[in-house]
Amino acid sequence: MNGSVTMRYASDGCDHESAPILSVEQVRRYLIERVLPVAGKEVVATETALGRVLAEDQRALMNIPGADNSAMDGYALASRDSERAGEFRLVVSQRIAAGQVGQPLAPGTAARIFTGAWLPPGADTVVMQEYCRIEPDGTVVIHGPITRGANVRRAGEDIAADACILRRGTRLRAQELGLAASVGLARLPVFRRLRVALLSTGNELVEPGAALRPGQIYDSNLYMLAGLLQGLGCEWFSAGWVPDDPTQTHEALERAAEAADLVIATGGVSVGEEDHVKAAIREIGHLDLWRVAVKPGKPLAFGRIGATPFLGLPGNPVSAFVTFCLFVRPFVQRSQGIVCGQGGADTVPRSFPVEAGFEWSGAKKRCEYLRARLRLTENGATIVEIYPNQSSAVLTSAAWAEGLVEVPEGHTVAHGQTVQFFPFSELLS
Ligand code: AMP
Ligand code: MG
C-alpha cells in the first residue's frame, strides 16, 4: 500500500464514509510497517520463559549428544569383530548403564550397554538385545550380519558445538525450552512483555457482576480481548469503561497511552454521532481510519497518542474478535519482537483447503470470515461447517467455532467446493 495516500486521508480528518476502502492484506502490511518493537530485555529462568520472545541468539557450547552413545539396550561391539553372516559369539567384558563411563573395549569382546550410555572407546556398533542370546557361560551369541554404526547416536548429530540453536525473535514454545535446557541454559534473555491498555467505549456497557438497567449490556469485548492478549503473552490492563462523551473519551485515551505500549479500544469508531474515539485521537494524536473490505469488521482505526500506537476496533464482539485475529495479532507479535516466519510463531496466518459442508451467498464487495468448525464424515472425509447465525453481534458463533473460513470478495460457496480454513491455532496464539 502507498503509505502517503493513507496519511493524506488520515490527516484530512476524514470520516467513516469518506475513509479509503482497503483490503485485509493492505491493512496488515500497513500496520506491520509501523511497528516499533519493545526494546527492553530481562533474563528469566528457562522454565518460566514459555511464550516469551527470545531477545538474543543462543548458541550451544557443546555437542549434543556430547559423545557417541547407545540408542538401544543391547551389546556394544567393534563391527570388525562380527561375522558377515550367521551367529558369532563374544565374551561380555563390561556393563555400562546410562550415566556410567566404560573402559576401552577389549578386542574380541562386547559390552552390555543400555540406552543413553556412552559407547566405550573401541566400540562402533550396538546390537539390540532382541537379537542376542546369553549363554550359561556369560558369553553373548549374536545373529549377524550387523551394520556398522547401527543403533548409535553420533556425537553432535542433534546439535554441533557453537551452532546457533535459537534465534532472537523466536517466541518460545515448550520444545524450545527443552532445547535450551539440553545445552545447559538455565536462564534466557527475553524481551519484556508488551503492556496493552484495553478500553471499552459505550454508554450501554456495564461490568459483569453489576446489575443491568434497561438498555444496558454487559461488556464482553474487554474480557475477550484480555484473553486474546494473554494468549499472545502480553500484559494487559483495563483503562476503564468510557461513556460516549468527548471529554471523558479524550482523558481516558491519554491516561491509557501514558501507561501502555499499545492502546486498544472497542466501539466508537463507526459513523454514529455517539462515536467519539476518532475525534479524540485526532485531538491528541494522529489517526488513520479505514473501511476494510472485510466482514465482519468494517471500520478499523489506527493511530498514535503521543508515541503510543492506538488500534480502534469495531464494537460488535465478533467484529472485534475477527479484526483482532487478522490485524491486531500480527501487529502485537511484531511489537513483542517476534521475527516473522521464525520457529514458534508466524505473523501471517496459514490456512488449508477443506471441502465446504455449507452454502454461502457471499458478501460481494468484502472478504468474509465465517465462524467454522471441522467435521469428520462417515466416509472419513473432513468437511467444514459454519455456525448458522453469522451476525457480528452473535459471539456464540466464535465460541462454537474452531477457526474461520475465508470467502474472498465477490465469491460464493457451493456445497463440496474447496474453501480456505484458518484454524484458531493460526489466529490466536
Ligand atoms: P459501536 O461500534 O460502538 O457502534 O458498537 C457496535 C455494537 O457493539 C453495539 O451494539 C454495541 O452495544 C456493541 N458493543 C460495543 N462495545 C461492546 C462491548 N465492549 N461489549 C459488548 N458489546 C459491545
Ligand atoms: Mg458505541
Image: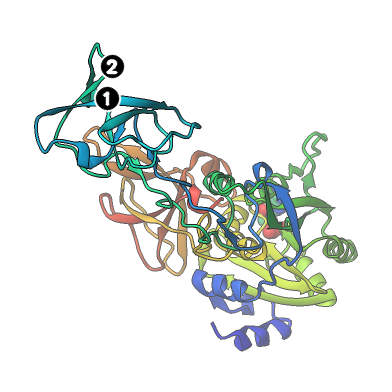
Q: State the residue position of label 1.
A: 91
Horizontally, residue 425 falls left or right of residue 358, namely right
Residue 11 appears at what percent x and percent y? 73, 84
Is there a contact, CB below 8 Å, between mark 2 and mark 1?
yes
Q: Position of residue 191 (x, y in %)?
A: 70, 59
- The N terminus lies in quadrant: bottom right
Where residue 273 sits, quadrant-wise, is bottom right
Question: Observer-nearest residue: 19 or 282?
Answer: 282
Residue that numbered label 2 is attached to: 138
Which picture quadrant has residue 363?
bottom left
Residue 268 horizontal side relative to residue 418, left or right: right
Q: Earlier in the sequence, mark 2 or mark 1?
A: 1
- Which residue lies at the image location 77% right of the left edge and 37% below the top edge? 208
Q: Residue at x 61, y 61 (%)?
A: 333
The answer to whether 292 is drawn above or below residue 124 in the figure is below
Q: Position of residue 353 (x, y in %)?
A: 32, 55
Q: CA distance from mark 2 to mark 1?
A: 7 Å
Horizontal placement of 176 versus 280: left or right? Answer: left
Name which residue type carries label 2.
Gly
Label 1 crowd bin: few (<14), some (14–19), many (20+), radius 10 Å: some
Q: Amino acid at mark 1?
A: Val
